Image (spheres, rainbow, N blue to C red):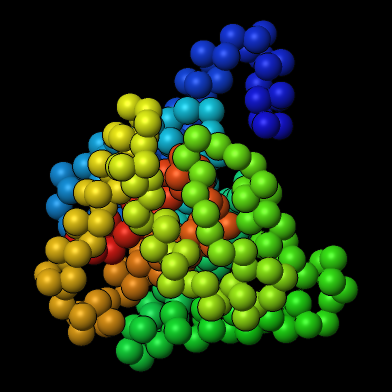
Amino acid sequence: MRINAFLILFSFGFISLHFLFFSFLSFIGGFYLFKFFSDRTDLSEYILIAIIFLIPNILFWTSGLHKEALIMFSLGILLYSFNQYIIYKCNISLVVAILFFLFLINVRMYMALIILPALIGYYFNEKTKVKAIIPYFISFGLLLLLIIFYDVVVPNEYRLALKISSFQSSFINTTGNTSFKVEYVGNSWVGILSAFPEHILNGFVYPLYNQCKLTWCRLASLDSIILCILMVLSLFKIKYKYILNNNMALFCLSIGFGLMTIIGIVVNNAGAIVRYRSIAILFIFVGLS
């Protein structure tokens, strides 16, 4: 990672200092996420602290030398700054939000692609009186249409569908202890969209307990079981009319399920899924709480 190469100039090879630096950045991001959610939701501060800082999956993967720490850092400042711009019309906040959005693009492109239409939907809901679901439906729909149009007009080697299938192929061709079989989507949006139900389910259910041979894998499978149980229970608890008119719930759920969809399509390794979905779980839990 390029940041580690830069930090080594100051740490003189002491990797423990890198861990501390990444954990510090992650804590800053978590703090600003807490401020953002506490300002924009009615959730108890204790619930927010538990979701952001105490869920084992989120805590583990955002605290080490992983990109998830940088994602937590950039997301926290990005969302807080964007919200400050909406409330106070502060141009400095908008500049900060744009800078951290660009940083997020550099860290993990697909996450920025999910965040962008969610931010657009969030902004228009704050400025208009339409039903909350409509701006999200339009922004995500337009994004999908623009991506498909882009793939139609550009040469094959630059198509996003090809990049998605290439990422999936790299995972399929890499054998791991927790790899599982998935349907190859191919270099077409028909294949990608037709496999949507199976792949989004993969993001939630793996790793399966009966397929785990290692202790850490069994612990991770318990995380999946708890996640699935909470999802099922929420189906009975949720007031759907309330969610369809709740800007923050739609904002969080669109990000969470959007990330789960991309992870499920590309990744066929349960260990990697557990890592990549850590940020998605945070938004899903806030959205359903």
Q: Nearer the viewer, residue 274 or 210?
A: 210
Q: Quadrant of residue 98?
A: bottom right
Left or right for 61, reference 129: right
Residue positioned most to the bottom: 130
Q: Is residue 59 above or below residue 99?
A: above
Look at the picture and state if 188 lies above or below 111. below
Q: Residue at x 47, y 28 (%)?
A: 64
Q: Position of residue 47 (x, y in %)?
A: 18, 48
The number of numbered discs placed on residues in the rendered structure image is 0
Within the image, what quadrant is residue 156 found in?
A: bottom right
In this rendering, is residue 266 above or below 13?
A: below
Measured as percent of width and height from the top left, residue 117 is found at 52, 73
- Residue 149 x, y percent position in the rendering: 72, 84
Quarter containing the C terminus: bottom left
The answer to whether residue 82 is visible is no
- Residue 61 visible (yes or no): yes
Q: In the rendered image, which quarter is residue 134 located in?
A: bottom left
Residue drawn 67% across the image and 47% down it: 173
Depth check: 198 or 87 in front?
A: 198
Q: Is residue 225 left or right of residue 17?
A: left
Query: What residue appears at the point 63 percent right and 84 percent down from the top-left corner?
Result: 145
The residue nearer to you, when weighing 95 against 28, is: 28
Q: Residue drawn at (67%, 8%), measured in percent from left and top?
A: 12
The quarter of the rendered structure image containing the N terminus is top right
Tell me: 107 left or right of 210. right
Q: Residue furthest right?
A: 155
